[in-house]
Amino acid sequence: MEREQRWNNIARIALTFVIAASGGVGFALLRIPLHWVLGSAAALLVAGRFLKGKLYWPTAIRNAGLIPIGYTLGTALTAATLGEMVRQLPSMLWATVLILLFSFLFSCLMANVTGIPLRSVVTGSIPGGLSQMIVLGEELKGVDMTVVTLFQVMRLMGVVFLVPLIALNPLFSGRSGAAVDAGTAQEPDWTIGLALFYFVVTVAGALVGKRMKLPTAYLLGPIIGTAALVVAGVPAPDLPAPILDIAQITMGAYLGLMLKPADIKGKRKMMLTAAAMGFSLILFSMAAAFVLTSLHGVPYLTAFIALAPGGMDQMGILAQEAKASLAIVTSYQMFRIFFILFVVPPVLKKLFAARWFQRIERWQMRHGG
């Protein structure tokens, strides 16, 4: 029985992969940017409505796909780019604080308009990692996890589909120019020893990161391990394109099966609110990118992707495709993830316990919606 179930799961995974890859190929033929991620997600989002119970994509496969992406992002973090990160640290801080403040104020407005509980909207609107924000929501009292999950998934899906279309639009990408990461030289070639060495380092980095409970450990662990070797002078060649393509499919498949339309029937108001929240965060990031460009001379395209309220993995892939600076995008996205992970939870707990916040909640419950 157990063996039969195992073979059944393998067949479901194979079917899921075929549909996801077909979506990627279709989007590639249509010349849609980030086609392996977006095409896979779109194909499974549609197929999921007709093949209920027949699609399966374990988190372990997505995690494995994050490792080569983490390697690619880690190769951009040279000694020169790390120095640039230190120089831009104040900008990373203000950018993160401003986007969180904007998220909070817009959440208050949307909660008042829709009548959705304020603390649920606030928690669901924070642009952190999906899994981390869901775990945080479970730890906070009075938070509706349905609202939090829906808002986080809608934000992520909105960013995954909208930001690439905006960032790779000729209006932006044509004017911004390609950013070149500091400290890059002629690309070295792969050897069997070097490939095995980086394979061990990145996999070990992912497992150690998981053990240390790092956010998005299967991405951050390989980034840190690879960056440490690059700074130490170990050559880091580019990964073959097919490996990165498959890694992107694993991510797109995971995203496509994450949002289940059948589970959100009757939640039209929440979906519209979540979509408005995600879109407003994207617009805010576009505006903030102009400030970052003027302060540090960062190309606008790089600044926008660096500040976009998405996941570090998706934005890293987008940065690579758009020829933006991987180092700047990774550093800004990484800083926001760590800030939200370590600073936001205690702040939210104190905020929700504050009398003035509870008065706003009571007023919103009486007058909202």
Image (cartoon, grey):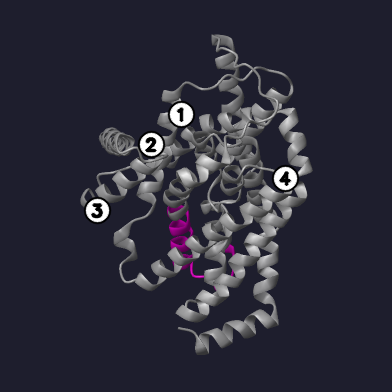
Q: Nearer the viewer, mark 4 or mark 2?
A: 4
Quadrant (top left/top right/bottom left/bottom right) for the C terminus: bottom left
Q: Residues within 10 Å of mark 2 (few under 14, many from 20)?
A: many
> What amino acid type should be assigned to the residue bearing mark 2?
Trp
Residue under label 4, please give it: 296
Residue drawn 29% across and 34% down? 29
- As drawn, which residue projects farthest toward the bottom? 366
Q: Mark 2 or mark 1: which comes first in sequence?
A: 2
**Mark 2 → mark 3, Cα distance in angstroms:** 21 Å
Between 317 and 29, the residue placed more toward the observer is: 29
Give the structural element (helix, strand or loop) at label 1: helix
**Mark 3 → mark 4, Cα distance in angstroms:** 47 Å
Q: Mark 2 or mark 3: which comes first in sequence?
A: 2
**Image position, residue 53 (x, y; %):** 26, 48
Q: Nearer the viewer, mark 3 or mark 1?
A: 1
Residue drawn 68% across and 23% down? 230
Q: Residues within 10 Å of mark 1 (few under 14, many from 20)?
A: some
Between 160 and 4, the residue placed more toward the observer is: 160
Q: Which mark is residue 36?
A: 2
**Quadrant of res 301:** top right
Between 222 and 323, the residue placed more toward the observer is: 323
Give the structural element (helix, strand or loop) at label 3: helix
Contact? badges 1 and 4 (CB < 8 Å):
no
Left or right: 184, with 267 as reference point: right
Quadrant (top left/top right/bottom left/bottom right) for the N terminus: top left
Instruction: Report if residue 156 lies within the magenta region.
Output: yes
Q: Mark 4 or mark 2: which comes first in sequence?
A: 2
**Mark 2 → mark 1, Cα distance in angstroms:** 10 Å
